[in-house]
Amino acid sequence: MRNAAYAPTERTVPTRSAKRAAYDRETVHSILDQAYVCHLGFVRDGAPVVLPTLYARLDETLYVHGSTGSRPVRMAGAADPGLPVCLTVTHVDGLVLARSAFHHSINYRSVVVHGTAHQVTDEAERRMALDALVDHVVPGRSADSRPANAKELAATAVLRLELGEVSAKIRTGGPNDDAEDMALPYWAGVVPVAPAYGTPVPSDDLDPAVALPPYLAGA
């Protein structure tokens, strides 16, 4: 039976505000599933590199999109040992304004994943991962679009990263002002931040007979 939580490690226990850390799978998966872009960190020629990219989660595996010529894909290769990486995802939920400049903060939810990325070479798994990447952005879209052809597949690569060494970190609530600052005449509180989706705008060359798909009707 799979554990309900990831085991903390030296790399996943925060050195500050450790009480904000969470390791349960439900929390981690929720944070990952609600974001679109991750930042993938790795070391190249002794220097750190961090790249924003699309990703998707299928159970305990993250799939990361890239071109066949991208640095992390080339470095991960098609065989062991793979590429040591650190992947992060962050949501900003609020701007926390305190009475003092020092105590300003943000409310956030974040996930950090440590592990080794491997290039996906199995054709069936790669197609499954690419469908998941499309559906992660817009659920149902992969079945409502033309699948990638041979040329497009040849130019596209996918990295696989298993969820093993993982932690979430969350801040909620208002400002943590010092007691001696409570009477200062400055506004304090939280400005909520949330994603907003506009009305879908059809392409200029779209046939007017093509209706808005149901999965976009609520966007």
Image: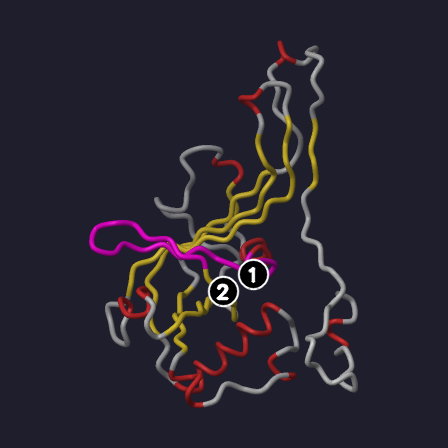
What span is in magenta? 32-52
Residue 54, numbered label: 2
Identity of the residue furthest to the bottom in this view: 150
Above or below for 135 versus 153: above
User: On the image, numbered disc 1 is attached to which residue?
Assistant: 36
Label 2 crowd bin: few (<14), some (14–19), many (20+), radius 10 Å: some
Residue 74 relative to residue 35: left or right: left
Amino acid tagged 2: Leu
- Measured as percent of width and height from the top left, residue 165 is found at 40, 55
SS for dot 1 = loop
Q: Are marks 1 and 2 in contact (CB under 8 Å)?
A: yes
Q: Is residue 154 visible?
A: yes
SS for dot 2 = strand
- Measured as percent of width and height from the top left, residue 2 is found at 49, 65
First in sequence: mark 1 vs mark 2: 1
Residue 189 is one of the magenta-drawn residues = no
Residue 200 relative to residue 113: left or right: right
Nearest the viewer among 206 and 55 is 206
Q: CA distance from mark 1 to mark 2?
A: 6 Å
- Measured as percent of width and height from the top left, residue 75 is found at 26, 66
Above or below for 88 versus 132: above
Which residue occupies 50% across, 53% down?
89
Residue 42 is one of the magenta-drawn residues = yes
Nearest the viewer among 149 and 121 is 149
The C terminus lies in quadrant: bottom right
Which residue occupies 70% across, 36% down?
191
Q: Main secondary structure of the magenta part?
A: strand
- Measured as percent of width and height from the top left, residue 109 is found at 57, 46
Q: Quadrant of residue 105?
A: top right
